[in-house]
Image: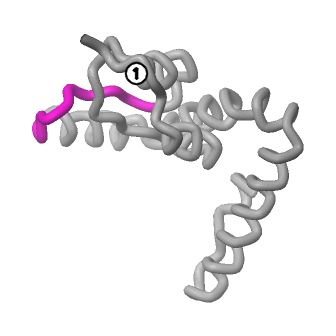
Amino acid sequence: MTDSVIPSKLLTYMASGRTIIASVNAASETARRINDASCGVVVTPEDPRALVEGAMALHALGANADSMEDGAANMWRPISTKRPFYNNTIGFLKRSFKRRCRADGAEPAQRHW
């Protein structure tokens, strides 16, 4: 049996515009969303070797992994631009993240904000 629900954290990960490594069933809704958005890799669940191989594959992509990050952000954008609640929430999270980075002495990557 495959998963027919999407964990809410997946949408948060996609909204962040970061590349995703998901250890889920390849036939699950989560895997389908990640593959449709081309925003990461799906690896076999409960398989540490598959997780390492997925991370190594992303590392090997280097700068080309940016296109996966764009895929995640683009998949989220149609939802977020239609609903003011989501826009406000994303704005709040971005501002909070920036404040946290400054407090830690780091500067967030300008590309994403």
Magenta part of the chain: 40-49
Query: In the rendered picture of this protein, how many numbered marks are placed on residues?
Result: 1
Residue 102 colored magenta?
A: no
Which residue is at 82% across, 47% downward?
85
In the rendered image, is residue 99 in sight? yes
Which residue is at 51% across, 21% downward?
33
Q: Quadrant of the N terminus?
A: top left
Could you tell me which secondary element the residue under label 1 belongs to? helix
Q: Position of residue 95 (x, y in %)?
A: 76, 69
Which residue is at 13% across, 35% downward?
46
Is residue 11 or residue 47 the one in the foreground? Answer: 11
Q: Amino acid at mark 1?
A: Ala
In the rendered image, is residue 63 in sight? no
Residue 43 colored magenta?
A: yes
Query: What residue is shown with label 1?
Result: 31
Is residue 107 or residue 63 the one in the foreground? Answer: 107
